[in-house]
Amino acid sequence: MTPLLEPQTPRVTGFRMKLVVAIMLVVSGVTLLALYLAQRRLASSVEDDLQREFVAELDALERAREVRHAMLVERCRSLVRRPRIRAAFEDDALDLLYDAAQYELQDVMTAPGLRAEFYRFLDPRGGVIAPPGTPSVGALTAGEQAQLALPAVPATPQVGYLPRSRDGADSISEIIAMPILSSETGEPIAAVVLGFEPFEFGRRVRDSGMRAGIWLAGNVHGIELSAAAQVRLADVVGRASSAPVRLELDRTPHLVFAKRLNPESQYAAAFEVCVFPLTDLLARQGQLRWQVLGAGAALLLAGLAASHIVAGRLSGPVEQLAVDSEANRALRRRAEAALEMTSAELQRSARFSADASHQLKTPVTVLRAGLEELLSRDNLTPEECHEISALIHQTYRLSSLIEDLLLLSRLDAGRLKLEFSVVDLSALIEASLDDLSALPDELEVTVETDFPPGLRIVGEKRYTAMILQNLLENARKYNHRGGRIRIAARQDDETVVLAIGNTGRAISPAAQAHIFERFHRAAMGEDVPGYGLGLNLARELARLHQGDLQLVRSDGNWTEFEVRFRVAKTPVMPA
Amino acid sequence: MKPDRQLAGANRHGSPACAVLGLALLAFLALLSAARAATIEGRVTLPKSRATPVVNQRYEIVTKAGVLSTNPPVAVVYLEGSFPKPATPPVTQILQKDLTFIPSLLPVQLGTKVEFPNLDDTYHNIFSFSPPKRFDLGRYRPDERPVPSQTFDVPGLVTLRCDIHEHMRALILVLATPHFVVTDAEGRFALTGLPAGRYTLKAWIDSKTTREHVVDLAADTTLRVDFP
């Protein structure tokens, strides 16, 4: 075998390589795809988390601002209802206004918590009523004070933001202009503007690093940002999107959120600007990327190892298969060669048998004719007559043998094709028994039959009869004096079983295996005539009938053969 | 309702019916004492009432576009001229009761001292930012003695407020004449005991509206003047 395998090894190795590469490709592809998706998902979930955190903080800030704003407005509203302040406007006593306010607004200017930084009154046209030089109103520069003015007295509280310089530092004040309503008509007759320190101004909110500032007139207050960053921020503020926007500020990505602080206010628009640095996010994402990459590499290595093993495992049987198939091919080639040879020999021998038989038939016929003519002479002695008769009988035997050989040669050559029709086996048996009884019976054998009439089988009548005759002949030949023959037939489902048994010496177990071989005559003794072709012929014919012939029993004093035929479904054709 | 003790022509604490009755009584007395005094009767056309008058009427001071008036509307009719100051300053009262001023519109002669007793069980803090008289009485309780008061020396309209109760409002019309009267709710009035001569009769309707009519008064005559 080994020499046969040599040229196959490179092909098997190639197969293994291809398998490894294919598995690697699939594993790498799947791994990379999975990694990519996992990374994207994780990254987006981290970003979502962060954004959610940001939005939650914004919401908290917003709620706190709203509460504070409501408190401020309520406080201012209670201030402007004070009778002295109303009296100053309603009773034409503006000169008493700031004096009264000093008394009435004392608590708001000194209270801890929501302490006001300054206040000014607006006249009915919205202009600022200049305070007397008392410090209690809170210091403002002339420019700052001028910015408190409104085009008209507002009907509702107006929120604005005033950039200021507080102790030289950039700062901003939240201002609320609260209308002073007439006590009877409810119409605004004046307003008071109070300035407060803005909520959470410039303070880092919690530990997240979010910074909140106020965007006013193109400048951001409360957050340290470069001019370029302010310009970029202006764009976000201009859009006034309600969702956080991702923005690169000073080479660091930020989430930026801008919201109008004083919608519908008569004061200049101010925006709350919340800036959330994404450095944390980037760090987390970077870390995540490395983790995912590491995991991916490990996975890939494991995949490669697995693919190697799997490829080895898979290619093993394939290698074996290749080896086996190569061996099989060699075997087959040999078998085919042998078969061809055998077939040729068989053909040759069959042709020879056929030729020989044909060549023999004529001389035997000539011989018989001569002998018969010799027998018809009158001058023969009874002994001569007997001798010649015996010789004639021998020619018949010879003819029969030649017929059998011819038939066998045709069988061997595969040239015998049966023409199936329906055969009435019962009638055929009866006919055979008639023939049998016509023969000279030296042994005085009794015949028992056991078969129903009308058993129909598939076959060609001529050859069916031949099987029957061969078996019956054997049963008679190998019987002993006063013995018996039993013929039984029955239908068994799709088959008809014909059993022919006879008394007589049993066939030895050693011989039983060979009785169907050609020219085998067991140890029957030379006293029984025959050439050992009958059983072989009968079996061949039975098989041509798509049935079989078997020895079912041969022991003691009984030998029994069994033939199986196919049952014919259609009724018997008239013969 | 407290009796009106001091001042001829002082109204009767916001009740027009009482005021008319008082006026009639005073006119009768004046006729008896000064038989030669003149009388003006008439009617001031008042602005439409802004609210349905309630049975137990009180005036409340309302501001409309900076104009103070009473609701339901009443007018103060007075004779302008040069009259001598009273020898002793008249004294009158504005009560603080049930978180309102009673009366809510009080005409007084120049130099009158007005007392402001607190009849509620709570603090009141009366003040005025009005140019004719600015004052602040501070917080005081009903048992405050002497009863806080102010003397009104400058003619004009004074708005009284309470610093604690922002809705409380009253008007004091300081006049340089002893001859004045508050009309009833229909605007009817009668001024009696007037000196003869040529005067200007004025009707104060609200803080921005004062109508006037020149009258020649003769002794023992009753003049009818209707303000449109």
Image (cartoon, rainbow, N blue to C red):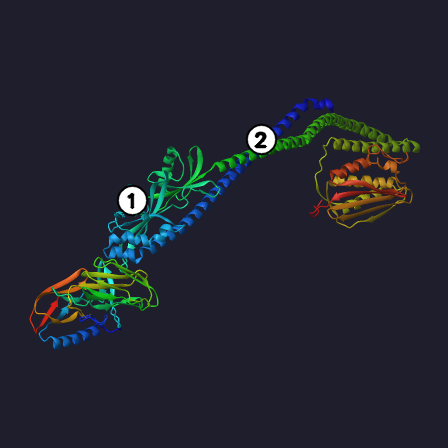
Which quarter of the image is occupied by the N terminus of chain A? top right
Q: Local crowd at mark 1 within 10 Å, few (<14), some, or many (≥20)?
A: some
Query: Which label belongs to residue B8?
Result: none
Name the residue at 32% across, 54% down. A103
Examine the rendering and report whether any part of residue B29 can be seen. yes
Q: CA distance from mark 2 to mark 1?
A: 75 Å
| Label 2 secondary element | helix
- Would you name the residue on which mark 2 appears? A25
In the image shown, does A369 or A189 lie closer to the viewer?
A189
Q: Are marks 2 and 1 on the same chain?
A: yes
Classify B187 as above or below A347.
below
Which quarter of the image is occupied by the C terminus of chain A? top right
Q: In this rendering, would B103 be left or right of A398? A: left
Badge 2 amino acid? Leu
In the image shown, does B224 or B196 lie closer to the viewer?
B196
Badge 1 amino acid? Gln
Q: Position of residue A192 (x, y in %)?
A: 30, 51
Which quarter of the figure has residue A400? top right
- Would you name the residue on which mark 1 appears? A145
| Label 1 secondary element | helix
Q: In this rendering, would A396 be left or right of A235? A: right
The chain to which mark 2 is attached is A
